[in-house]
Amino acid sequence: MHPQRSQKENVPSVQDFDLYAVYKKLGSTLVVSANPPQFTMLAASDQYLEIVNLKEDDVVGKGVFEVFPGKPGEAESILLTFQRVIEQKEPIELPTVKYSVLEGDSARECYWSTVNTPVLDDQGEVKCILLSTKDITEHVHSQEREKEAYEQIRKQREQTEALFLDLPVGVTYFSNNGYKIEYANKAICEIWNKG
């Protein structure tokens, strides 16, 4: 007869796991060493590598700005954020960051939402920064398209109203209930002696 094991004994401990293998399967994350100005990349999750279209060997052991130089002005804002994380020793969330990713000879414009979380050592100093990122490029482009469509509709409405007001014949537009005049052009106002 086998001795019964308690439920706690049946639960594996964290030492039973390959935490790096677990990390690799987490969302889109990147671990960066707190070694300014290089900020050497220590690990990248599978999802992160897929988004940036790179292999682990292209990233790990290299500086963030060596692999992702970005366009002028882009790298500086990320560098400042990393420095703030190190100084404040607190997570910093960036809801929308524009940062280009090189693909061959060209750059793909990307938008990211990211939380930069410091990982402290035993002395309370920032050892590395965990970047939890989300590619929000499609969402940003969708918002831009929506804004452009709204602007186009607004311009068309203004043009229609201008055309309506300048027609040589009297025209009136009433509200749905028929009691309120929404628009009356110049010609009808002159007919009514209101112009």
Image (cartoon, helix red, strand yellow):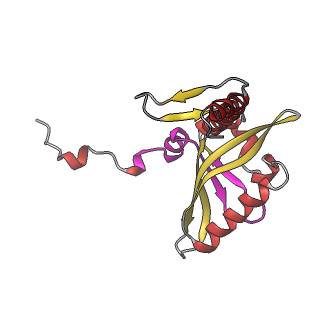
The furthest residue to the right: 105
- Report the span colored magenta: 15-43
Q: From where the camera sits, is residue 125 visible?
A: yes
Question: Where does the image place residue 81, in percent across and percent down from the top left?
Answer: 67, 63
Q: Is residue 39 visible?
A: no
Q: Position of residue 72 (x, y in %)?
A: 85, 53
Q: Residue shown at 64%/45% (left/top)?
A: 112
Q: Which quadrant of the rendered structure holds the N terminus?
A: top left
- Of 153 and 8, nearer the camera is 153
Above/below status of 140 relative to 93: above
- Residue 21: percent from left, percent from top: 52, 41
State the residue lying farthest toward the bottom: 123
Nearer to the camera, 81 or 13 = 81
Q: Is residue 42 magenta?
A: yes
> In the rendered image, which quarter contains the C terminus?
top right
x%, y% of residue 13? Answer: 35, 50
User: Residue at coordinates 69% horizontally, 30% vertically from top-left?
Assistant: 156
Q: Residue furthest top?
A: 169
- Is residue 30 part of the magenta span, yes or no? yes
- Which quadrant of the structure image shows residue 39? bottom right
Q: Does residue 59 appear to the left or right of 142 in the view shown? A: right
**Considering depth in this image, is 193 or 58 the residue closer to the camera?**
193
Left or right of 174, for residue 100: right
In this rendering, would 162 be left or right of 89?
right
Residue at x 86%, y 34% (from the top left corner)? 106
Between 60 and 183, the residue placed more toward the observer is: 183
